[in-house]
């Protein structure tokens, strides 16, 4: 008898002899069954039944460790017809009990008793735990993985105090070790399958698993309509860059959990990559679907309000109605993704439904992106100039530089077709400096030709706020052509202030220190107009063209415009009105005190040669 357990009494049995006998016939039958098995799960269940019959034990189970924190649970069990209701409950061990429970197994991994009372003196806590199962006899054999106990296989009898023979103990130990090997094989298979189909961060399906399950589900013909929704978190890279990757991961996990809790029966979802998720959802009406999307976006932001890091989460959702006759969900996923990509930047969560025009539009955008760098190298981008006019004298007092793209074999590409794309992909930074250098080069040439040069305004995207070399590049180009600072006017939009007020204020102060003239474009489009007037050191305000609507301007609008113009003049800020198209608008602007204007009434944007002709004529 093992010396460590000798004090526990002679009824606790261990393998101690050097001779090792087993029922080899029974063992061989188990080995053959497992060897030829095609379904390990069902075969293990059959083995438990055979153990129950062989040992005449009403209950046999396998208990496996879930985690070091949670303890063990019963993963397989067999109960024969003689099972008592008192025994009809699953044997699970919490972490504390499991730690103590492992002490019962000997060096060979075996534990047995044929009288429960003998356990009371040895381990009172476990005695009280097992007593609740009304056992009188048991054999249990440990399951090991890499030398660490991961659970046990056990059979139980509550009808009699049985004296287990050495052959019974040996046979059970051998079969348990064989079962352990197959359990390990099964668990490894499950881990491999999980790695193959499950996203490791969020624990939800990956795209491959989603595609397989969605295809299988859609083969079941149903009257219920479905849509594929392709969602991403707008500017997710900003969250990673500013708040760190750990915060970004928390956002993704939270998103996945919320999405899971939002699904209905027969809906499914997955993480595609990074911040991209896909969902197969029911479709009844567009109104109901849009309501679900908006509610989800609201819930996501409500969750973030309770977090340490405060920022708004905006979602882009592309939607495609699933054709019930398609063989694969892949085409619907691609179309939903096309719809998502077509969403333009907004200050709220947006959704977009796929249609054929979207596909054509994205193909066009892809063509623009594919040729943009080559076009810049080949000087396909041309600077046009639109004059700014002093209304009282009708003289040209400035101009705005605007870019046009003359694509070979294509023609003139309107700026509203390529500028938003360049804003989105960041190429606008190179485009803006390309135009700036072209303007500086032309101004230098006009000065050298003794022309009467007027200030030229050049547009710069808010994307430049994210680059640290913006001012250095500006100064480098201006100094390269020795341009007087008063002849160059730098235009940024009011929306840039709304997005990043502190960064823009710092930038404007630095530009003023370098004596650059600053123009604030599209003034009045946001909600911070008065704040801008008091804080930003600008030289020129350009009133948004929406102030001059077609038709009559209301009395309230006239009052607002008059006060903005008067305050600007008091602050020594010039005011230019954009989009002037009629004589009535020009007269109205003169009447309320706006002396500078720009628009088709005076001139469309024109190439440099035409602009110079007009400059000579209008500055005499």
Image: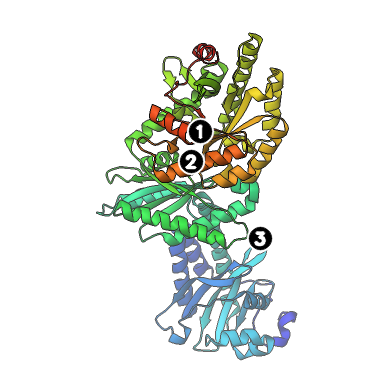
Q: Which residue is mark 2?
A: 561
Mark 2 element type: helix
In the image, residue 298 sits, relative to residue 414, either above or below, namely: below
**Residue under label 3:** 146
Work out whether residue 500 can be spotted: no
Q: Nearer the viewer, residue 471 or 566?
A: 566
Query: Which image quarter: residue 341?
Result: top left
Q: Is residue 357 above or below residue 454?
A: below
Q: Position of residue 340 (x, y in %)?
A: 43, 42
> Considering only order in the chain, which callout, 1 or 3, is on the residue closer to the N terminus?
3
Q: Which residue is the extreme one toward the left?
A: 223
Residue at image position (29%, 53%) is: 285
Residue 620 visible at all: yes
Q: Cα distance, mark 3 to mark 1?
A: 84 Å
Element type at mark 3: loop
Q: Residue at x 54, y 87 (%)?
A: 132
Q: Quadrant of residue 129?
A: bottom right
Quadrant of the drawing holding the C terminus: top right
Disc 3 to disc 2: CB gap under 8 Å: no
Which percent across, then down, holds residue 159? 49, 88
Residue at numbered disc 1: 594
């Amino acid at each position: 008898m093992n010396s460590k357990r000798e004090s526990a009494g002679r009824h606790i049995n261990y393998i101690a002899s050097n001779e090792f006998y087993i029922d080899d016939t029974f063992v061989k039958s188990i080995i053959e069954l497992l060897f030829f098995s095609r379904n390990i799960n069902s075969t293990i269940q059959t083995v438990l039944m055979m153990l129950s019959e062989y040992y005449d034990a009403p209950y046999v189970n396998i208990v496996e460790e879930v985690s070091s924190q949670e303890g063990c649970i019963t993963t397989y069990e067999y109960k024969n017809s003689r099972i008592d209701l008192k025994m009809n409950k699953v044997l699970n061990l919490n972490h504390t009990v499991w730690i103590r429970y492992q002490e019962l197994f000997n060096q060979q991994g075996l534990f047995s008793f044929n009288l429960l009372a003998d356990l009371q003196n040895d381990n009172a806590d476990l005695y009280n735990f097992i007593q609740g199962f009304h056992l009188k006899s048991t054999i249990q054999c440990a399951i090991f993985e890499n030398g660490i106990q991961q659970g046990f296989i056990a059979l139980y009898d509550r009808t009699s105090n049985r004296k287990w023979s050495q052959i019974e103990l040996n046979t059970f130990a051998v079969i348990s070790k064989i079962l352990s090997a197959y359990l390990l094989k099964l668990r490894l298979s499950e881990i491999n399958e999980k790695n193959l189909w499950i996203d490791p961060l969020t624990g939800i399906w990956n795209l491959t698993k989603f595609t397989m399950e969605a295809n299988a589900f859609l083969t079941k013909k149903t009257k219920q309509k479905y849509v594929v929704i392709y969602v991403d978190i707008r500017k997710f890279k900003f969250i990673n860059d500013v708040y760190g990757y750990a915060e970004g991961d928390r956002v993704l996990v939270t998103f996945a959990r919320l999405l899971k809790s939002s699904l209905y029966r027969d809906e499914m979802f997955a993480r595609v990559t990074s911040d991209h998720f896909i969902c197969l959802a029911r479709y009844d009406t567009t109104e109901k679907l849009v309501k679900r999307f908006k509610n989800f976006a609201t819930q996501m932001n409500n969750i973030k309000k309770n977090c340490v890091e405060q920022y708004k989460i905006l979602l882009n959702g592309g939607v495609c109605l699933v054709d019930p006759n398609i063989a694969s969900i892949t085409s619907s996923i691609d179309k939903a993704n096309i719809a998502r990509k077509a969403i333009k930047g907004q200050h709220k969560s947006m959704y977009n439904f796929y249609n054929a025009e979207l596909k054509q539009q994205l193909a066009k955008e892809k063509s623009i992106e594919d040729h943009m760098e080559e076009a810049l190298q080949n000087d396909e981008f041309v600077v046009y100039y639109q004059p700014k006019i002093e209304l009282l004298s009708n003289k040209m007092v400035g101009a705005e530089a605007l870019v046009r793209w003359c694509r070979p074999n294509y023609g003139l590409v309107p700026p509203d077709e390529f500028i938003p794309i360049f804003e989105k992909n960041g190429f606008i930074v190179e485009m803006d400096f390309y135009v700036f250098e072209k303007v500086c080069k032309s101004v230098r040439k006009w000065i050298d030709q003794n022309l009467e040069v007027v200030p030229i305004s050049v547009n710069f995207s808010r994307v430049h706020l994210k680059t640290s070399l913006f001012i250095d590049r500006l100064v480098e180009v201006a100094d390269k052509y020795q341009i007087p600072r008063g002849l160059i006017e730098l235009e940024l939009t009011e929306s840039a202030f709304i997005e990043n007020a502190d960064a823009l204020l710092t930038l404007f102060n630095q530009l003023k220190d370098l004596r650059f003239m600053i123009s604030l474009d599209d003034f009045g489009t946001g909600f911070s107009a008065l704040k801008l007037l008091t804080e930003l050191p600008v030289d020129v305000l350009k009133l948004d063209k929406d102030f001059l609507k077609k038709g009559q301007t209301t009395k309230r609008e006239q009052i607002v415009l008059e006060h903005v113009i008067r305050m600007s003049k008091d602050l020594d800020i010039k005011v230019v009105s954009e989009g002037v198209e009629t004589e009535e608008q020009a007269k109205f602007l003169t009447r309320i005190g706006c002396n500078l204007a720009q628009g088709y009434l005076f001139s469309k944007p024109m190439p440099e040669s035409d602009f110079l002709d007009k400059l000579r004529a209008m500055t005499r």
